[in-house]
Amino acid sequence: MVEAIYREVRLRLIGAVVDEDGMSTAEYAIGTIAAAAFGAVLYGVVTGDSIVDALTRIIDKALNTAV
């Protein structure tokens, strides 16, 4: 039982240490592209007329409230 657990831990550690050249660069590239695409979509949504109008109404309402 203890040997099986030791063997499993050893195999997991070896698997975690295995060198994967090039994977980090590819992952960074995909992450950068995804972040840029998300930013473009978010910019398009936020600068749309309906969002700008809604934010303007919220700000006007907040500034015009009497305390």
Image (cartoon, rainbow, N blue to C red):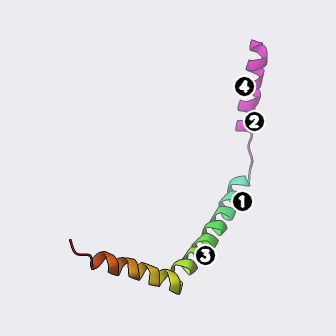
Residue under pointer 3: 41
In three-dimensional space, the C-alpha distance between marks 1 and 3, rounded to whole angstroms, equals 23 Å
Other residues around mark 1 within 10 Å, as few (<14) / some (14–19) / many (≥20): few
For residue 36, above or below residue 60: above
Tell whether label 3 touches label 1 (CB within 8 Å).
no
Q: Say how many tags the image has.
A: 4
Image quadrant in which you'd find residue 60:
bottom left
Image quadrant in which you'd find residue 66:
bottom left
Residue under pointer 4: 9
**Upstream in the sequence, badge 3 or badge 2?**
2
Tell whether label 3 touches label 4 (CB within 8 Å).
no
Residue 35: assigned label: none
Amino acid carrying mark 1 in the image: Ala
Q: What element carries label 4?
A: helix
Residue under pointer 2: 15
Q: Is mark 1 on a helix, strand or loop?
A: helix
For residue 21, above or below residue 35: above
**Upstream in the sequence, badge 1 or badge 2?**
2
* Residue 9 among those drawn in magenta: yes
Residue occupying the point 74% across, 39% down: 18
Which tag is nearer the camera, tag 3 or tag 2? 3
